[in-house]
Image (cartoon, grey):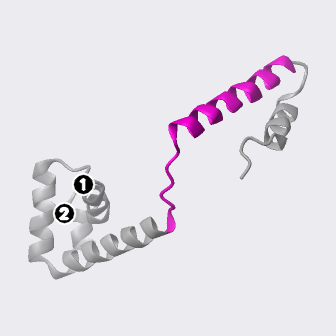
Amino acid sequence: MHSLENQLPGGFSAQVNAYLDGNLSMDKKAFVEELVASNDKASEMFKSKAKQRAELKKLVPNKRISKESLSLLKSELREVNKDLLKDQKLSMSQKIAKVLDTTILEF
């Protein structure tokens, strides 16, 4: 696998990640595809990375927020910011504590 890491800038693992993210140029994408097709170790690594990526995606919830909820959230955040700004005499740690103690969303 060490020789694979030296074949591509940043290493083969990084190139596979970039490929899966869709962040490679057409030339680099073609090179990764050719290497995966012709090298068993590269193919194994690619499949492993793709599987890991799929498993991670399953762990991340796909939540959508409505325009109304987003608008309400922005409004509430503006109010929190206004409250913080009017308390100019508080230290930074006190301001941070105040933000952390403020309920922004209730479920």
Using the image as rendered, state which of residue 49 and residue 100 is in the foreground: 100
Residue picked out by circle 2: 7
Magenta span has 60? yes
Q: Is residue 57 left or right of residue 106?
A: left
Looking at the image, residue 60 sits to the left or right of residue 50; the answer is right
Q: What residue does disc 1 label?
A: 9
**Quadrant of residue 99 in the image?**
top right
Q: Say above or below: 67 vs 1.
A: above
Q: Is residue 87 visible?
A: yes
The image position of residue 1, as x and y in percent, is 26, 76
At x 88%, y 27%, the residue is 91
Tell me if 52 is positioned left or right of 9 in this view.
right
Residue that appears at 23% across and 64% down: 6
| Tag 2–tag 1 contact (CB < 8 Å) | no
Q: Residue furthest front?
A: 68
Q: Is residue 11 left or right of residue 96?
A: left
- Marks 2 and 1, Cα distance to the nearest angstrom? 7 Å
Give the residue drawn at x 24%, y 54%.
9
Magenta-tinted stretch: 59-87
Question: Would you say the magenta stretch is mainly helix, strand or loop?
Answer: helix
Was residue 62 drawn as part of the magenta stretch in this picture? yes
Amino acid under label 1? Answer: Pro
- Choose top left, top right, bottom left or bottom right for residue 5: bottom left
SS at mark 1?
A: loop
Q: Could you say where residue 30 lies in the image, as x and y percent from the top left?
A: 10, 58
- Residue 1: in sight, yes or no? no
